[in-house]
Image (tube, helix red, strand yellow):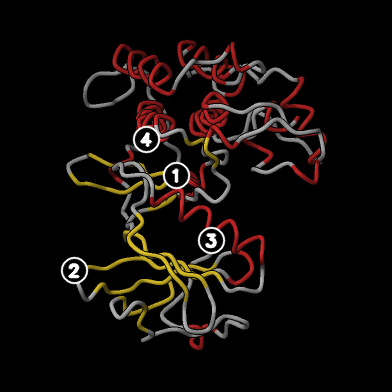
C-alpha cells in the first residue's frame, strides 16, 4: 500500500474520494489519508472522539465486488480474534455513499517488507520476528482460522522501546475457518494467495490446515535471513512448479555465515508434504527459539560479524 499525504486534493489523486473531516458512526473523524491500496481502497488516520485515541480506517469503494467481499470477510474474521499479535478491529459499517469501512487500531512502525528495503536484519532479529509471528499464528490457528496469505507485506513491526518490538498479522481478507476449507481442483484461476509464499497444497487445491501457513512462514524466514526468496522464477506457472517440485537452496549457498541449525528449520518448514513440516506454530517457534538462544547471547548480537543492524535501531514511521 503506497503512502499518501494529508488529502487527496494535495496529491492530485484521481478516483479517490477526499474524506478529510468526514465523521463515521458519529464517532470517528477522518483526519488524513495515510495509504492507498489496489482499486482505490484507502486507509485513513482518524480520531476516535469517544475514546480520545487515534485509529486507522480502511475504506473500500463498492465498485469492486471481489475487493469488497475480501475486505468484509477479513473484517469479520479479524473481529473474532483478540491477541496482541493481531490487528484489533474496533468497528465496521457502511459510509453514506455506500462504501464499506473498517476501523482498526492505529499501528505505528513498518511492514517487514519495508524493514527489508531499509536495511538487512541480523539473524537473531530475523528469528525474533518469526518467533513473534508464530506466537500470533498459534493463537489464530487455535481459533480454527487459517490465514492463507502470510508474507512480508502482511507482517507489521512496531517499536515498543528499550530494544523491544511487536509483530502483528495484517489482512485476513482470504483467511478461512478450517471447517470451511475444502479441497478443490487445479485451476489457476481459482488459486488464491501470493504465489511466492504458497504451499504446494494451496497451489494444487488440496486440503489446507495450519501447516500451510507454516510453509509461508518458512518463506518469510528464508527471505529475512538471505534477502531473497527461495524460489524466483520468471513466470507464475514456473513459480508454482518450483514450489511443487524444487528443493529450496541451502541458506549456506546464499550466505555461508548463516548457521546450519537455521537451515534445518527453514528446510523443515518448506517441506513439500505437510506431514514433513512442523506440526504446529508452537513447535516451530520452540525450535527456532531454542536455536536462537543457543547461538546468540541475550543481547542478540551474533557470534560472527555480519553487515546488519539490530531491529530496535529502526525508527518507527
Query: In this image, 174 relative to 43: left or right?
Result: right
Eye-nearest disc, 3 or 2: 2
Among the two numbered marks 1 and 3 on one chain, the one whose residue lies closer to the N terminus:
3
Q: Position of residue 148 (x, y in %)?
A: 57, 38
Foreground pick, 308 / 21: 21
Which numbered marker is on residue 51?
2
Q: Are marks 4 and 3 in contact (CB under 8 Å)?
A: no
Q: What distance separates the C-alpha of mark 4 from that of mark 2?
A: 26 Å
Q: What distance separates the C-alpha of mark 1 from that of mark 3?
A: 13 Å
Foreground pick, 256 / 201: 201
Please tell me whether mark 3 sits on a helix, a strand or a loop.
Answer: loop
In the depicted structure, whether residue 83 falls above or below residue 247: below
Among the two numbered marks 4 and 1 on one chain, the one whose residue lies closer to the N terminus:
4
Among the two numbered marks 1 and 2 on one chain, the one whose residue lies closer to the N terminus:
2
Q: Residue at x 39, y 14 (%)?
A: 287
Residue on which the image places disc 4? 136
In the depicted structure, whether residue 164 falls above or below residue 272: below
Query: In this image, 76 relative to 294: left or right?
Result: right
Q: What distance separates the C-alpha of mark 4 from that of mark 3?
A: 22 Å
Q: Position of residue 140 (x, y in %)?
A: 41, 35
Among the two numbered marks 4 and 2 on one chain, the one whose residue lies closer to the N terminus:
2
Which numbered marker is on residue 1?
3
Mark 1 packing: few (<14 Cα in 10 Å), some, or many (20+)? many
Q: Residue furthest front?
A: 179
Please tell me whether mark 2 sits on a helix, a strand or a loop.
Answer: loop
Q: Are marks 4 and 2 in contact (CB under 8 Å)?
A: no
Amino acid at each position: 500500500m503506497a503512502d499518501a499525504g494529508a488529502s487527496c486534493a494535495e496529491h492530485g489523486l484521481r478516483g479517490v474520494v477526499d474524506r478529510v473531516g468526514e465523521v463515521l458512526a458519529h464517532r470517528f473523524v477522518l483526519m488524513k489519508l495515510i495509504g492507498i491500496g489496489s482499486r482505490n481502497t484507502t486507509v485513513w488516520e482518524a480520531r476516535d472522539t469517544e475514546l480520545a485515541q487515534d485509529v486507522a480506517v480502511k475504506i473500500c469503494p463498492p465498485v469492486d465486488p471481489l475487493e469488497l467481499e475480501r475486505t468484509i470477510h477479513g473484517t469479520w474474521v479479524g473481529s473474532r480474534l483478540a491477541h496482541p499479535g493481531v490487528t484489533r478491529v474496533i468497528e465496521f459499517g457502511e459510509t453514506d455513499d455506500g462504501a464499506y469501512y473498517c476501523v482498526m487500531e492505529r499501528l505505528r512502525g513498518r511492514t517487514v517488507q519495508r524493514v527489508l528495503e531499509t536495511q538487512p536484519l541480523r539473524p537473531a532479529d530475523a528469528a525474533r520476528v518469526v518467533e513473534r509471528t508464530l506466537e500470533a499464528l498459534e493463537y489464530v490457528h487455535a481459533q480454527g482460522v487459517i490465514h492463507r496469505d502470510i508474507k512480508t507485506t502482511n507482517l507489521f513491526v512496531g517499536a515498543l522501546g528499550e530494544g523491544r518490538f511487536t509483530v502483528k498479522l495484517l489482512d485476513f481478507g482470504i483467511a478461512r475457518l478450517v471447517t470451511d476449507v475444502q479441497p478443490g481442483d487445479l485451476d489457476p484461476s481459482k488459486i488464491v494467495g501470493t504465489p511466492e509464499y504458497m504451499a504446494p497444497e494451496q497451489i494444487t487445491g488440496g486440503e489446507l490446515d495450519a501447516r500451510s501457513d507454516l510453509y509461508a512462514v518458512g518463506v518469510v524466514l528464508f527471505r529475512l535471513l538471505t534477502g531473497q526468496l527461495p524460489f524466483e522464477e520468471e513466470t507464475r506457472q514456473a513459480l508454482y512448479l518450483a514450489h511443487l517440485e524444487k528443493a529450496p537452496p541451502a541458506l549456506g549457498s546464499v550466505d555461508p555465515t548463516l548457521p546450519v541449525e537455521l537451515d534445518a528449520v527453514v528446510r523443515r518448514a518448506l517441506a513439500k508434504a505437510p506431514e514433513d513440516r512442523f506440526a504446529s506454530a508452537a513447535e516451530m517457534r520452540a525450535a527456532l527459539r531454542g536455536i536462537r538462544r543457543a547461538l546468540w547471547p541475550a543481547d542478540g548480537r551474533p557470534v560472527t560479524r555480519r553487515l546488519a543492524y539490530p531491529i530496535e535501531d529502526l525508527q518507527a514511521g
